Image: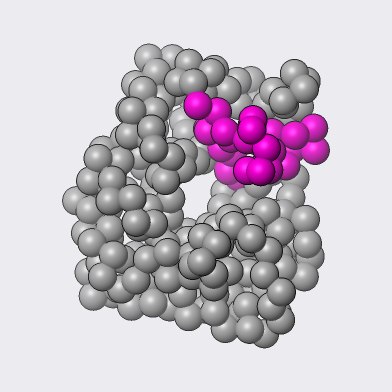
Amino acid sequence: MNFFVIDINADVGEGMGNESELMPFISSCNIACGGHAGDISTMHEVVKLAKKHKVKIGAHPSFPDKENFGRVKMDISCAALFTSLKHQVTNLLNVLKQENATLHHIKPHGALYNLAAKSEKVANVILEVVKSMHIPVKLYVPYKSVIAKLAKENKIEIIYEAFADRNYNEDLNLVSRQENNAMITDENDMVQHVLRIVKNKKVKTVLGNEFPILAQTICIHGDNSNAIKMVENLNKKLKTNGISIR
């Protein structure tokens, strides 16, 4: 009998073309919807694959900045950001309607995700987008983040997320991708990192300290060149350690 349950999610539709290989090993996906990557065509392709593999579908909106893959903070007004995010999610919703599928969650991408964890202003823009959808949609957020707190206050259902392939700082923020130790690249290290999060509800930081963390979903980045091998291994090792994936 499994006493632990976790969702494994991956960011998809970002131009890697590896979705058909990823889908068998994940239980939810975050589809790029035109902000940092993706277009209507790629959304259709990935939605079809997600349906085939019974993978929950999420929108992965971003700063409208394909040049920097959404990984750089943009100087943009709240109104312009709201309009862009609403447009991105609506595009995916239209695709889902045509493909007879439903939207399970929204997960901001890159710099937007990181900013919303700390900035009330940015977090509130995302929450307004969620509320404007008028559908029951969940929000993937980091534990102890500003957006998590504000979402609860706004009665928006949240799912705490942690990262399988990223290192953490002492404040539970992710190590910047500008740093050499931002990513966890060793398969065994990644498995131990995730097992600690799921079973012990703790994360070990780059300084070797352990801090409490909650996670209901674990993300592995689909644009990681080793993503397929790593997610297959993670899926297998979690199951052998008594953790159900769903």
All told, the count of numbered labels is 0
- The answer to whether residue 205 is above or below residue 32 is above
Quadrant position of the C terminus in the picture: top left
Q: Position of residue 53 (x, y in %)?
A: 23, 46
In which quadrant of the rendered view does residue 116 lie? bottom right
In which quadrant of the rendered view does residue 156 lie? bottom right
Taking the spot 52% from the left edge, 32% from the top edge, the residue there is 164
Left or right side of 8 for 101? left
Res 51 visible? no
Taking the spot 67% from the left edge, 26% from the top edge, the residue there is 203
Taking the spot 72% from the left edge, 68% from the top edge, the residue there is 122
Left or right side of 59 for 71? right
Between residue 93 and residue 189, name the one nearer to us: 189
Q: Indicate yes or no whether the magenta region holds residue 173.
A: yes
Magenta span dominant secondary structure? loop
Taking the spot 36% from the left edge, 23% from the top edge, the residue there is 233
Q: What coloring was used for the rendering? A: one colour
Between residue 189 and residue 151, name the one nearer to us: 189
Quadrant position of the N terminus in the picture: top left
Q: Position of residue 225 (x, y in %)?
A: 39, 38
- The answer to whether residue 179 is above or below residue 78 is above
Between residue 59 and residue 183, name the one nearer to us: 183
The magenta region covers 160-185
Q: Position of residue 104 (x, y in %)?
A: 42, 59
Q: Position of residue 92 (x, y in %)?
A: 37, 71
Q: Indicate yes or no whether the magenta region holds residue 64.
A: no
Res 204 visible? yes
